[in-house]
Image (spheres, rainbow, N blue to C red):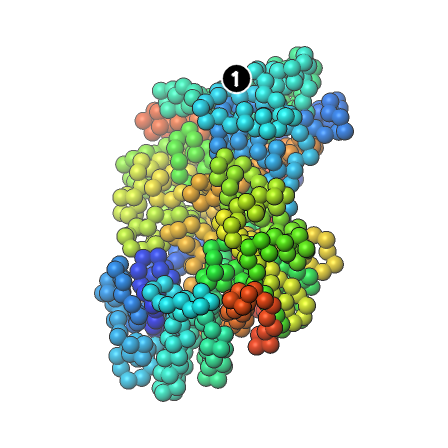
Amino acid sequence: MKQIAVITTVYRYLSHAQHMADRFLVGYPHNGEWHRPDMKVVSLYVDQKPPGDQSAQRAQEFGFRVYPTIAEALRCGGDRLAVDAVLIIGEHGDYPRNEKGQILYPRYEFFQQCVEVFEKDGRVVPVYNDKHLSYSFEKAKWMVEASKRLKFPMLAGSSLPVTWRLPDLELPLDCEIESALMVGEGGSDPMDFHALEAMQCMVERRKGGETGVKAVQMIEGDAVWKAGEEGRWSKDMLSSALSRSDTPQGLSLVDGRTQDLVGSGQLPKLVKNPAAYFIDYTDGLQCTLLMLDGALKDFNFAARRRGTKDIVSTQFFLSPVPNVTYSACLVNKIEEMFETGHAPYPVERTLLVSGVLEACLTSRLQDHRRLETPQLSVHYHAPRASQYCRT
Amino acid sequence: MKMTRREWLAAAAAGSLALMPGRRLAGGFGLGAPPPTPSSTEEGSNSPGGRLKIALVTGIMFKYAHSQHFVDRFMEGYGWNGAWHKPPMDLVSLYVDQVGPDDISRERAARFPSLKIYPTIAEALTLGGSKLAVDGVILIGEHGNYPRNEKGQTEYPRYQFFQQIVGVYRSSGRSVPLFSDKHLSWNWDWAKVMYDTSRSMAFPFMAGSSLPVTWRIPSVEMPLGTRLREAMCVGYGGVDSYDFHGLETIQCMVERRQGGESGVKWLQAYRGESFWQAYQDGVWSRDLCEAALCRSHTLTPAREGFNDIFPTLDDMRRIVKDPVAYNYEHTDGLKCTLLLMNGLAQDFNFAARVEDRKEPFSTQMYLPMPPDRTTLANFFSPLVNNVEKMFLTGKPSYPIERTLLTTGLTAAGVESLYRNQARYETPHLSIRYQPTRESTYWRT
């Protein structure tokens, strides 16, 4: 039975650590049954213990120990690496924000300490890192390079790429994509990361595979509507994406009516501070993330394939709180890597998206100017098989 | 024929017919009546430019009432197949039986001058003239202040509305397609009259819940001709209310089994302590109940501090208030059970035991339900879309016999509860029909 160390910032109700690590403790719904991983959490490191901390209770009930350092957690108090896998969850908790508005979660620092143990003890194990790798692309890159250098399996990212889709849409591998658009809400870092990664998991399947991003730009306010008028993002694609939404705000809240938010001209009234993230890929693909707080509460994707008039679209389904069953979809992928030693999808996806997000936030800080991103020439190929929940 | 799990899932996911033995063509109708022939297209539309005119007859209309979901989808349009869809027909008349303080029918009629409210059902169908002047009718008798009888049924006037509608059909010498929301009537005899009338007058008639046509998570179909051993829905809601949705959830799946639908012999309801006794005695399969619950996205955490933890039977006893089960047997021996487990889950989950397959077949019929989780009850979109299709083609998307049977099952559940949970024989429910070959649930 594989032994797992959990390294996290906080462990309290509805934190990522709680709902993800708990699934290793009490099981989770998967493929129509309650799946209980054949693994055991043996050690835990929590960086902060705010009110509501559950680490001691979980440790006592499930028979593991909470250690004061990451190294001790990985060695279970001994002198050698004593676990078979590491789950790093650096989300939630009281950490400073930088001038770009990013919360400085210590994911890189946690990861680095794990790598130190691997190097000192001469053994490596698979590592999952929740959400983006780091607020800094440089640090993120170091993390991925460390996993390559030391040859350990690494997985990261959001649950959006692996959750249910309504409808069950997957773009065919090697299709030609002209452009893609994602619409969501929830503000910068964290929710934009989820949205960007959901878009990336769709477009990475295009012909030629992923070859990286050459430039990004983030704009805000009225400039977003103006860019729409100028055709910089496609109203048809936004319309298609929004046709998948179950949560239009405004008049739907007032009296339940359905709304063609694009056609009705309601969007500018509903969205006080829109944001558009433009991503220009090296191979010419153009993607746009629109964060339209006030217009909707879900995440919807649209793409136009080259040579077709039709737009395809889907909703990335975030199932309700408290079950947040979408995180079970993600935990299943983590478990798969822990079990097989093989990451079901490339960590380069998350590396690229981490860098895209950071570059977009830099663009915002620098008067919304377009930034060339030579550092983001990240190459990889999407897995052949679909990885999201569909059975 | 044995299938591996992978093959079976592939067939289910594709809605594939090819792998399953014993399938039959759809199109047979039960009770010896011939399938209806469309009349509206034969007789010609009264509408200029060929656009159909539609009337909607309802008990009441307020925010999130069924009538609001229908009216707004016709007037405003709705998201469909990845685009904004405006039905290619015009909702031109409304009859609203009760106008409460939160009525929105007046606001809708004021905002859309093409939509007129008439004081009687007859006038809504004749547009104030003397003869039927619409090409399709929608009947929604849900919500509103109507009497409740001693069995706990709300006596929504669907039958009375229906009679007035067919009265206009008769006096006009012309019938048009009719959609009736939810079960046909709280009263089985009346439901049967509605069905028989639609057959004798040969108009396309469709009815039922949105559960059979909404998203499924996962998006799977019961392969046609499947050999089923047992089926179950775990849902929530009340008797003579959401029980109907749960029964339609089961029926839209089991009607695809080998041989098609043959009707139901008896039903027994369980409530309260006898529910738990029956659960323990294995009256229904515990495995199927658990499989269905594993498809839920709204399991009440059985322990404080955990967000998603599977309940033990003791947990369920503590969490579920007033559990209700309808356990029934089809004429061909298939046993089905609807469990209403209020407090434990707030979604509709289906599970079935399939012959030669180890794991249960299961899915959730997903309702994006406002106001907590969404702002739109978009499960009405596929329902409205199927109604539109019937109006355009004169052909119901799925057989009315499904809803005739589930109407009878709902009434039988009420009856069994009323008779102290006694087994209730249902010879009147020997309803035979074949499912549609094509899947009609939302998946695009």
**Residue A285 vertical position relative to residue B61 in the rendered view, above or below:** below
Name the residue located 56 percent from the left edge and 28 percent from the top edge.
B108
Residue B432 seen in this snapshot: no
Q: Is residue B145 above or below residue B284?
A: above
What is the three-letter code of the residue carrying label 1?
Answer: Gln
Give coordinates of residue A118: x percent, y percent.
Answer: 38, 83
Frontmost residue, A344 versus A7: A7
Q: Secondary structure at mark 1?
A: helix
Q: Residue at x 53, y 46 (%)?
A: A270
Q: Quadrant of residue A258?
A: top right
- In the rendered view, does B306 fall on the left or right side of A246? left
For residue A283, what is the image quadrant? bottom right
Instruction: State the image coordinates of residue B240 (x, y, percent, origin top left).
Output: 42, 29
* Residue A319 vs residue B11, the one in the foreground: A319
Residue occupying the far front of the picture: A367
Q: Residues within 10 Å of mark 1 (few under 14, many from 20)?
A: few
Q: Chain of mark 1?
A: B
Q: Position of residue B314 (x, y in %)?
A: 27, 47
Residue, disc 1: B160
Q: Is residue A344 above or below residue B279?
A: below
Identify which residue, B236 or A221, lies in the foreground. Answer: A221
Identify the residue at image location x=34%, y=29%. B421
Q: Tell me the residue at 38%/62% (across/down).
A: A16
